[in-house]
Image (tube, grey):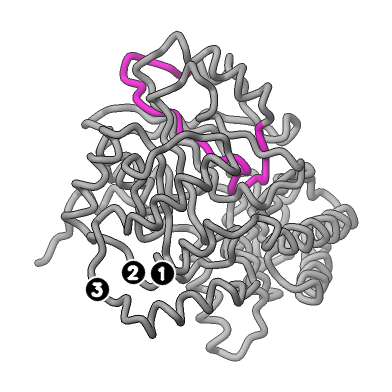
Amino acid sequence: MTKVSERLNRLSESATLAMARMSRELKEKGHNVIALSLGEPDFDTPNFIKESAKKAIDDNFSHYTPVPGMIELRKAISEKFKRDNNLDYSPEEIVVSTGAKQSLANVCLSLLNDGDEVLLPAPYWVSYSEIVKLAEGNPIEIPSSIDNDFKVTAKEIEKYITPKTKILMFSSPCNPSGTVFTQSELEEITEMLEKYPDIYIIADEIYEHINFTGNHFSIGTISSLKGRVITVNGVSKGFAMTGWRVGFIGAPLWIAKACNKIQGQVTSATCSISQKAAETAMIANPSEIMFMKDIFLKRRDLVLNKISEIEGMKCNVPQGAFYLFPDVSYYFGKSDGENIINNSDDLCLYLLNSCYVAFVSGTAFGNPECIRISYAASEENLIEAFNRIKIQLEKLK
């Protein structure tokens, strides 16, 4: 009898990918499924980026590149960090990977030993906890509340710090809540962290260009944290380049070298054509892609308005990304006569199977009373989806 490793048994299937799989299965059976579960922009990659990739193909840019990425791309990322974020990472402190997910895994595998603890303000992206487990660390959830815009304070974080704490990992704008930490809030957290010099910070900024506050602040710019912040970013969300698979880190040189060493034994460099496309994206003026943010903001307001018409669905006003994370605990314990809703997992399955709208339960994000809604979809589909679920939820008594 074949047995998989204990390492694999410790991991959970990605909740977002699991819901996407179930949605595909229903579509294959002929159902008109509206999938609001995946975190993928519904825009196409901008033409000026696609043209650079076509040119790279014609120029036969089809050979291996250095493991951390071609130097031209790393220089472009270094300049992007300075231009957009006031971050000072040299090209040698940058590692380009096959998506930001690999970047996160590289860092955790480089820093964590068995039993080290990683603080995860909840809600957090589903793969954070599983990546920590893969690296033999222990994910430690720090709860938050929708009433406080899903933000945690310095005092709340400090309560969970122990001698085993190695990393604080968070995203801003946040997936799944859309929460954006302000400069003053991050400075308050930094002041607390100054007392704990052995804790590193992984700042996931993949949604920086989808920020409705007009002011994205990078915690890595705070001088007292110099040498302790790993900034993670990529081209998937802001540039609508999910399938190109390019993520990257800016990190202290010794961490960058460690990630390079791990990546060299697992995947080596990411796709050479994708790297040329990413270089074009990094060089571009961010104004080239701001039209997507403007459309996302319009959709956010549309969905918030639709949610306000649904009894019992409580939602904050997210300031970034393209998600809503409403509290749906009002429906727990209710039934349509056949199905009993015990939790958000039940509610998501109920809506998927009854009216063919796919969301993701908040359980995997650390907030089981919520569901994640992606509004990276057409206005027509968003309106139709919420018309369907309003009718279906009214059946729960």
- The residue indicated by pointer 2 is 271
Q: Report how far apart the C-alphas of labels 3 and 1 lie in the structure.
A: 12 Å
Along the polypeptide, which appears first: circle 3 or circle 2?
Answer: 3
The kind of secondary structure element at disc 1 is helix
In this rendering, which labeled residue sits more in front, label 3 or label 1? 3
User: What quarter of the picture does the N terminus occupy?
Assistant: bottom left
State the mark number for residue 63: 3
Asked if 393 appears above or below 157 in the picture, the reply is below
Q: Is residue 57 left or right of residue 209?
A: left
The kind of secondary structure element at disc 3 is loop
The kind of secondary structure element at disc 2 is loop
Asked if 298 appears above or below 378 in the picture, the reply is above
- The residue indicated by pointer 1 is 274
Give the amino acid type for the residue marked by disc 3 in the picture: His
Q: Is residue 164 left or right of residue 381?
A: left
- Looking at the image, which residue sits at the far top? 195
The picture places residue 118, in percent across and down from the top left corner, at: 39, 30
Give the amino acid type for the residue marked by disc 2 in the picture: Cys
Does 98 appear in magenta?
no
- Looking at the image, which residue sits at the far bottom? 30
Residue nearer the viewer, 186 or 45: 45
- Assess disc 2: are there few (<14), some (14-19) or many (≥20) residues with their C-alpha within 10 Å of its C-alpha: some
Q: Residue at x 71, y 52 (%)?
A: 324
Along the polypeptide, which appears first: circle 3 or circle 1?
Answer: 3
Q: Residue at x 72, y 65 (%)?
A: 337
Residue nearer the viewer, 159 or 269: 269
State the mark number for residue 285: none
User: What quarter of the picture does the C terminus occupy?
Assistant: bottom right
Q: Residue at x 33, y 47 (%)?
A: 105
Q: Which residues are magenta?
A: 160-181
The picture places residue 254, in percent across and down from the top left corner, at: 26, 33
